[in-house]
Amino acid sequence: MQLRRDTAAAAAVVLSLVVVLLPCATEAHNITRILAKFPEFSTFNHYLTVTHLADEINRRETITVCAVDNAGMSDLLGKHLSIYSIKNVLSFHVLLDYFGAKKLHQITNGTALAATMFQATGSASGSSGFVNITDQRGGKVGFGPEENGGTLDANFVKSLQEIPYNISVIQISKILPSATAEAPTPEPSQMNITSLMSAHGCKAFADTLLTSAAMTTFEDSIDGGLTVFCPMDDAFKAFLPKYKNLTVAGKQSLLEFHGVPVYESLSMLKSSNGVMNTLATDGASKFDFTVQNDGEDVTLKTRLVTAKITGTLIDKQPVVIFTIDKVLLPKELFKGALSPAPAPAPEAEAPKSSKKKKQKSPPAPADTPADSPSEDPADQPADLNGVERFNGQRFVAVSLSAWVLSFLLL
């Protein structure tokens, strides 16, 4: 009896630990939180947020952030660059590979050429988006833009935080100079995105956007970075009957679901598959979709539909507009379509002698906005992601506990 009690107690402890620790294992890195622990990098951290680079860094894996302290940022800010050029310069300090302190001192053949997030934007020509990393004598490691002919302008100072092989945040001695990254970037103000859409096969979506409060949301996001996924006319016109039956709030959320508040070029989408928030994302209302690519094709997947990017209307940082072949349907608005309606119960055959009239069954409650638009989208969410995540964690926890019990009873 005592053995069984001890075994049960051990299993309970293991189960508790698994339940507590599993959610933590699913959390991604957060560059803002990492740098917040080091006040001397507050300016660098601030501009990662202002330029929306922090969001892009948090979505990526296998990445290295080369941070500079406040003094180094003062040198950059003294050049009075536009916020768009500052974004290019800082994106030049984000390497698309993992370089921890140990790896920096063990580089094969002593030197490596690393692609940067600036290179991934497509704004860098030739080798201007690459950084040369060289393990020098005396334990020093030098960094320099490849476009500068191999000159090593900065040195590795120390490691701030490493999560092998996910993210490495290191300090380098100064900002890496890059004429290409610092070049003036035209401001996107006065850009008429609806005119661009209308002129390239997305007139139905553009006209609808102009009549909605969502238009303000799109315009307010342009300067900070905006990616639009515009359904082609045939797809959106076919959807219009359902759209017209949505509530006012539902219509706005549907349109905002087709925008992302950050610049994402096609190459960036290909290299950063995963869940992406949208302009409609607000707290508990997730309104997100999943970016996937199959070879050269990039798709946007919701719980209800998978749309493919069919073309690019404009790619001029910080704005990019893509065309897609389907309307994106968020589960928060169309939860009724997630599962088939239950089959009606068979009616019992009435006795031949009965003269009572058959009563019509009351109509089934409408689940989709096309049938019943009375509910506000905020009242309609069907958060299945949380249920699936909880069920998966519960399954792992129970399985581990069962294994522990079996082991202890041997």
Image (cartoon, helix red, strand yellow):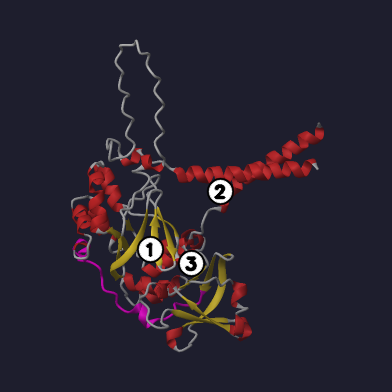
Q: Label 3: how many residues lie within 10 Å, few (<14), some (14-19) or many (20+)?
A: some
Q: Which mark is residue 198?
A: none
| Image x and y of residue 78, in percent | 35, 76
Residue at 30% across, 70% down:
315
**Viewer can see residue 135:** no
Q: Mark 2 or mark 1: which is in front? A: 2
User: Tag 2's secondary structure?
Assistant: helix
CA gap between label 1 and label 3 equals 20 Å
C-alpha separation, residue under disc 2 versus residue under disc 3: 31 Å
Residue 326 belongs to magenta span:
no
Name the front one of labels 1 and 3: 1
The image quarter containing residue 261 is bottom left
Which callout, 2 or 1, points at the residue further toward the start of the chain?
2
Foreground label between 2 and 3: 2
Q: Is residue 110 above or below residue 369?
A: below
In percent of the image, x 43 and y 43: which residue is there?
383
Span shown in magenta: 172-196
Residue 180 in the magenta stretch? The answer is: yes
Cβ atoms under marks 2 and 3 closer than 8 Å: no
Residue at left offset 34%, top offset 43%: 334
| Above or below for 126 versus 375 | below
Residue under numbered circle 1: 52
Quarter of the picture holding the C terminus: top right
Q: Which residue is mark 3?
A: 40
Query: Residue 98 vs residue 58: left or right?
Result: right
- For disc 2, the marked residue is 23
Percent position of residue 353, x then y: 34, 10
Q: Is residue 23 visible?
A: yes
Q: Position of residue 349 (x, y in %)?
A: 39, 19
Tell me the CA gap for discs 2 and 1.
26 Å
Secondary structure under the numbered disc 3 in the rendered image: helix
Looking at the rendered structure, the kind of residue marked 3 is Glu
